[in-house]
Image (cartoon, rainbow, N blue to C red):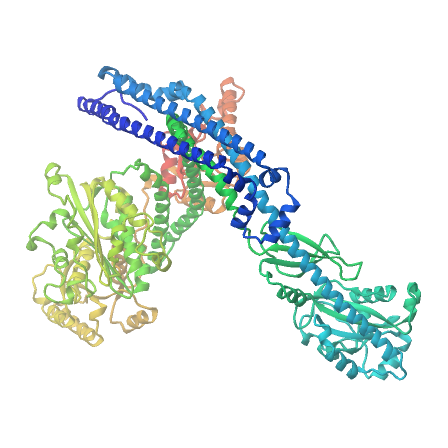
Amino acid sequence: MSINGNHSTSNGKFKMKKVKDSMHGSGGVLKWKGKFTMLLHVVFVVGISWFFYGLTSWLTSSQNKILLCGDFKNLLFRDFFDSSSHQLHGFSDQGISAKSNIAYDATEDGCRSYCFWSTRTCWWVLIGMMVMSLRISYFRFKTWSKQQFSLPQPQQLQQQQLMQHKLPLQIQSPAKTATKWQKKLLLLFVLAMVVVSIWIFYHFYQDTVFRRKETLSNMCDERARMLQDQFNVGLNHVHALAILVSTFHHGKSPSAMDQKTFEEYTERTAFERPLTSGVAYALKVTHSERESFEKRQGWTIKKMEHGDQTLVQDFDPTKMDPAPIQDEYAPVIFCQRTVAHIVSIDMMSGKEDRDNILRARATGKGVLTSPFKLLKSNHLGVVLTFAVYDRELPLDATAKQRIAATVGYLGASYDLRSLVEKILQQLASKQTIVVNVYDTTNSTAPINMYGTDVIDTGFLHVSSLDFGDPTRKHEMHCRFKIRPPPPWTAILSAGGVLTISLLLSHILHAAINRIVKVEEDCQKMTVLKARAEAADVAKSQFLATVSHEIRTPMNGVLGMLQMLMDTDLDADQLDYARTAHRSGNELISIINEVLDQAKIESGRLELEAVPFDLRVILDNVVSLFSDKSHEKEIELAVYVSNKVPEVVVGDPGRFRQIITNLVGNSVKFTNDKGHIFVSVHLADEMRAPPDMMDEVLRQGLNPLKDGSERNTLSGYPIVDRWRSWANFKQLGGKESLENPELIKLIVTVEDTGEGIPHDAQSRIFTPFMQADSSTSRHYGGTGIGLSISKCLVDLMGGEIGFVSERGVGSTFSFTAPLMRGELDSLDAKWRTHESSFSELKGLRALVIDKRSIRAEVTRYHLQRLGISVDTVFSLQSSFSFVSNVPNTSASAPLSMLLIHREVWEKESVIELHRLLKDAMSKNSTDRVPKLFLLANSMNTSERSELKSSHLVDGIVAKPLRLSVLSECFHEAFANGRKRQLYKAKQPASFGCLLKGKQILVVDDNAVNRKVAEGALKKYGAIVTCVDSGKAAVNKLKAPHNFDACFMDLQMPEMDGFEATRQIRQKENEFNEKLDSGEVSLESFPNMTCWHTPILAMTADVIQATDEECRKCGMDGYVSKPFAEEQLYSAVACHFESR
């Protein structure tokens, strides 16, 4: 914030009035606000007093004492936790802590003491809050009184305003100093109440947590015990089955058991083992018994496949490999029907099962495997294995005895998931907790045997499981399925106390905080200002980097295109090269516009005021979009009224940018034929009567007046362009009278595209906004073009508007105030093609087109070449015109006919040829007029067919522009000989200045070196190229033969700045030697001071300014991409001065 020292009288009165209003008017508001605040404090204090008085009365009554002290636990638990009487009794018997005993089991005396101290504490807190509230109210009332009765005098007001800006930065405010102790006291009060609230919450919450943990522990232990019991029942049944196999298979001779008997028995007794998914018996077979065993069984012992076999069809014994040779095998011979696919599989071939078998026969107990996926169910399970002995062993049998007595192994697989789910179904509260069973044999990587990963609900209880195998450890983890409900008792009790405290603290803090708010805002603004400045620097660095990286390759592209245009090209090739060159220049212009965006946003963008030819600009824009218009078969045309001056003064780059954006949008949104028409008129012509308007303006303003389709460029309907500038506030007239040299152009861009939806027209000029969300996906673009165009039009002092109808099209119009210019002031680049027009001046042409506006557009372009034009609207009309040519009194004979493709008829054209020959013979001349076809787009086969038929002398491709017409006409009138036109011819002095000069080009980019070398050699210079700053220092070490040097700035190892410094240092040392006589002047007769011109070449147009280059000793600056003329102009001035 700043205050200006000089104020006008009116401003001073206004500010004084404003201050007085703020002091008196707001004083009344402050007065009533203070009274209202005090009233609120009184009401609050009375309410709190009534609450504590009622609480004290309730606590002192004997009946409520008993309820509070004796039955509080039952009241609390039954109301908030909905627990049974039995659970409450068990919980109270256990006892939580000393504090819980005080809360739940205190005697009547203890309860009386607790109530007394609680009530006393509350009253002291209440009194403290009352005192603080009254002091704050008094302070605010006192402050208002001082402001009310000590109003500043008018003479002191200005000084106080100035001091307001200095106080926050120099001294502390008295109010801020006075509120320090109040803030400290307030903070202590808040902290004390927070501690009290936390204490209340902690005691209630601990009770709730203890009850939930005990409930979870009981439920989890109950499930673990039931799971263990069920598993032991299954284990006993499997053990009994092992004894059965030992008795009836190995104890009988012959065996009383076979696969069928085993299968039927296990099937009938499956109800006794509901948790087993299958039972199988594997026989112990030694290697010496393998052959006889396989013959007896009729199958080969198969090797157990490794890996995760989760599907039954994956176990096909016929596809398994035979078991490898080993000392002992355990092939399955009996199995339950559910696992019949494992018959013949060797259990000893799997590492896990082999270890299981070896432990089972050595211990004589059932052993478990680690969890694995069961077939069919795909659930995790374990295999319980028992060894089968051929005789009864003593209890103290050794492992060696047990191994010797082992004849087989009985195994059963358990589906733990089914087991746990069965247990949970037996419990009514199975839905309240989530159970997980883990194999924790490996404590670092436990295996989840049952259950899924669940969200941590806060409580976890672990119960140990004993499945009979001491080597395997299992645990059951239990959690509540949902998170525990909030402890409402603790929350409400603690929250009530804390809320009351915070409400009062907020009232007090609001009053205190107002005093220091200004200082905090000032600090925030300082930080934001620093951030904004840092962001602006970062933005500038980013734009500089992007600009440099794009400009460097573009320099090679444009330079090579320029060299290509200097070679022998036909008309089409030359046009393509020029279009590409212009497109590259447009890209560079866009990059420059991006760099100028920051200036636009900050309002620092400056417009040029140079003479230019706007007709040339329109030709360039049309050339830029010619390819796209051909692809979409769109008629693209431009027209400039003959009342518009040939030379105007303004900013050609910004003018071209506006038209490019508008035409680009029209091309983007115009599909399937139609047209885009750019027209330029004086704003004064809009107010002229219709008979004073030109043909295009008159027909454009009334496109459907007579119902003829000739009144539009393509025959498609168009919107009323009058409405696009109807809201313009200034449309010429007044400015022209004040300054006769000032003109106002009105430019319209008309298209027959999709149109803009009505609901989107209000935001069409908003940056980065398009008609709808699908526009950028379907058509591309960023939505910034129209916004930039509007900004540029506003900077020029013009206006922009549009009219659009869905399904018809759009018309954009803008005005541009410009100055009239003189033809002599026009730069040479705007007049590079005038020398080639002299051969066409004075010719006469006939345009045959059924659309009058299109014929007028063709007339406009031909008249620019100095050709007089007649128009007819059909081939039949041309017959009579051609027949009457010898009889006309025209000064010039008919030289050419231009026929539009829409009226082309082969038979009629043949007849037209005959009439032309007859007319020329009557006129006693051998020169037959040339015939040209005007076409929007035409493929190669059609072109070849027309040229081979010799019906036309040339095909003019639309959109029309000066270069295309001139090239086509010159080629036709030169009988097919190629002519190189429009090449920029340099004055003879150019070659004289640079001829024979030794110039060094330093650039690390080979393409840029090649471009600079080619451009300088055109002027006769002798060019030497190097690729580094070090090489340049060595080359330019005095004395040397170079006359000048072009130095790139950004190079590896040594940049251009450092190289220039070292070169200048060496030149200074050499000059000192010249002055001291160490070096003879006879060797350098014309040299009094050695200084080689060094000119910077760089794409960094933001940081590498001309001023910075001169600081390090450079003599000039050339930005990339550079043109030939730029290089010449930069270096020629140093040779002219010699």
Farthest front residue?
62
* Image coordinates for residue 192, horizontal then vertical, percent: 51, 30
In the rendered image, the quadrant that contains the C terminus is top left
What is the quadrant of residue 504 in the picture?
A: top left
Residue 265 vs residue 606, the one in the foreground: 265
Q: In the rendered view, tell whether residue 580 sits above or below residue 645.
A: below
Count the numbered circles shown: 0
Q: Is residue 1062 left or right of residue 669?
A: right
Q: In the rendered view, tell whether residue 1043 sits above or below residue 786.
A: above
In the rendered image, the quadrant that contains the N terminus is top left
Q: Can residue 1115 be seen in this snapshot?
A: no
Q: Residue at x 54, y 40 (%)?
A: 66
Q: Is residue 694 left or right of residue 201?
A: left
* Image coordinates for residue 393, horizontal then vertical, percent: 92, 69
What is the quadrant of residue 894 in the picture?
A: bottom left
Q: In the rendered view, tell whether residue 1131 sits above or below residue 766.
A: above
Q: In the rendered view, tell whether residue 118 sits above or below residue 660.
A: above
* Image coordinates for residue 392, horizontal then vertical, percent: 91, 71
Q: Is residue 343 left or right of residue 504?
A: right
Residue 794 vs residue 64, the one in the foreground: 64
Q: Residue at x 15, y 58 (%)?
A: 700
Q: Residue at x 82, y 74 (%)?
A: 282
Q: Can residue 863 be seen in this snapshot?
A: yes
* Image coordinates for residue 303, horizontal then vertical, percent: 79, 73
